[in-house]
Amino acid sequence: MATKRVVIVGGGGTGDYAAFALRKRGFGGEVTILSADKDRPYDRPYLSKEYLRGEIEVPKVFLHDEAEYEKERIDLRLDQRVSGGSLKEGRLTLEGGAEVAFDVLVLGLGGTPRRLPDVPQAQNVLTLRSLRDGRAIRDALGQASRLLLIGAGFIGAEVAASARKLGKDVLIVEALPVPLQRALGRDVGEIYAEMHRAQGADVRTGTRVDAWQVAGGRVTGASLSDGTREAADVVLVAVGIEPNLELPKMLGLRIEGGGVRVDEGLRAAENVYVGGDIALHPHPVLGRAIRVEHWEVAKNHGRGIAAAIVEGHQPYRGLPYFWSDQYDVNLEYRGHASGDDEAVWRGDRAARQFTVFYLRDGIVEGVLSMNDSKTNELGGKLIESRRRLDRAALESADANLAELAGVAGS
Ligand SMILES: Cc1cc2nc3c(=O)[nH]c(=O)nc-3n(C[C@H](O)[C@H](O)[C@H](O)COP(=O)(O)OP(=O)(O)OC[C@H]3O[C@@H](n4cnc5c(N)ncnc54)[C@H](O)[C@@H]3O)c2cc1C
């Protein structure tokens, strides 16, 4: 293969894994990462879990040692924001005006935490995306006794679980009547809220902040729509992200469904690949376009993009997967479904060891498991099989899931 210059914009999950996978596959050309982040690539999921709780420290959070970039000849340029460029001319423009030329471009730009317009800008109102955000929250929590969390999505919930483990009072204010209902359905959402309540978090669903109390540049409390007035030392706004689409728009890439439209092989234009949170990917197994904001997806997109660059264009078939650890509960999810899909339960809800299969027209589209890893893995095979399945067969404890999925050797 002719030597090429691969330029990766974004030093997150997609970008870092793409760079190292290129070398692993024997790519001999130039590999450059341009990252707006001031820190070298790190494992973002640690930020709401082990790192926040002080169980691991900074060197362990990084994905690679500095020396590994040098050894693999990966030119990692930090604190470099790409502000524009031309795909036709194969060049990018950095903030400050410098230009960088590429033959193949990879974009893994992630997202920016959403801010709510009526939340005051105050020293102790924080969001969580970067390592520096993580450090700020860790420091703030160290001084605090009561955390107010706005939003009970995965990141909010993980921070809540970490703060409870640290012995902090936690109040979660969630506008929806049931957390995560849209993604996981009402029943799972309720179990999830209950799990937090059982650990002492005060979870107020169907509730909003009506007014904020601010003194000396800090939020001191909030008046809630349930009529209560609550004190807080730290506020974390965790209401999702806006995918970073400014650069793809400037480069003229197709924006659709809140992301950059790519083909089955994660290619957005000739010699331009896009992965991770910003990619809207027509998934060849699921048969529809999906955009997923999860770590393993970003990592595996990075690896898939490297394979396409080295071996030639090919569909990316990996199923979405994520996990979330909260207290002593391990959640795992494979595939991509909606909370409105038909939910078929298997296992023991009361013991919090179960799996939910989400079916559309009898085909399993997603599988959620609580402390039930083995079933989740087999659930992935059921999704891949695209077989139409009988509800009763899935529910039955005697059913052999591997056999249902037609997995060899079952
Ligand atoms: C606290 C936290 C905990 C999480 N926990 C989990 C979990 O347990 N499980 C799970 O599956 N997922 C988790 N996620 C989600 C997961 O981290 C993301 O889905 C993943 O990081 C997305 O990877 P990415 O490559 O798309 O973007 P990112 O990892 O966000 O990387 C984007 C990179 O692009 C850079 N960038 C953006 N714009 C520019 C530009 N114009 N020029 C140069 N650089 C630019 C950014 O600085 C950053 O380096 C968590 C996320 C957070 C914030």
Image (spheres, grey):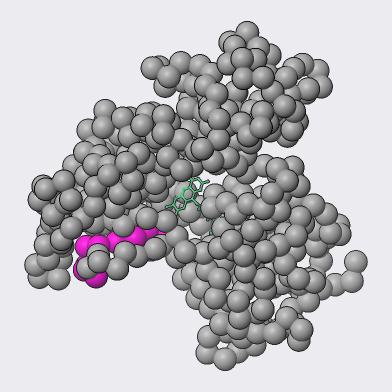
Name of the residue lying farthest toward the bottom = 97
**Residue at 67% across, 73% down:** 253
Specify whether 260 is left or right of 266.
Answer: left
Residue 226, x across and y down, in percent: 16, 46
**Residue at 52% across, 90% down:** 96
Indicate the quadrant where residue 107 lies: bottom right
Residue 156, x across and y down, in percent: 35, 48
Name of the residue lying farthest toward the front = 361
Name of the residue lying farthest toward the top = 398
| Numbered circles on residues, count | 0
Q: Main secondary structure of the magenta part?
A: loop
Residue 387, x across and y down, in percent: 75, 28
Indicate the quadrant where residue 128 lies: bottom left
Let me know if residue 386 is in the magenta part. Answer: no
- Give the extent of the magenta segment: 121-133
Specify whether 227 is left or right of 68.
Answer: left
- Classify the position of the N terminus by image quarter: bottom right
- In depth, the one of 269 and 357 nearer the eye is 357
Is 326 placed above or below 403 here?
below
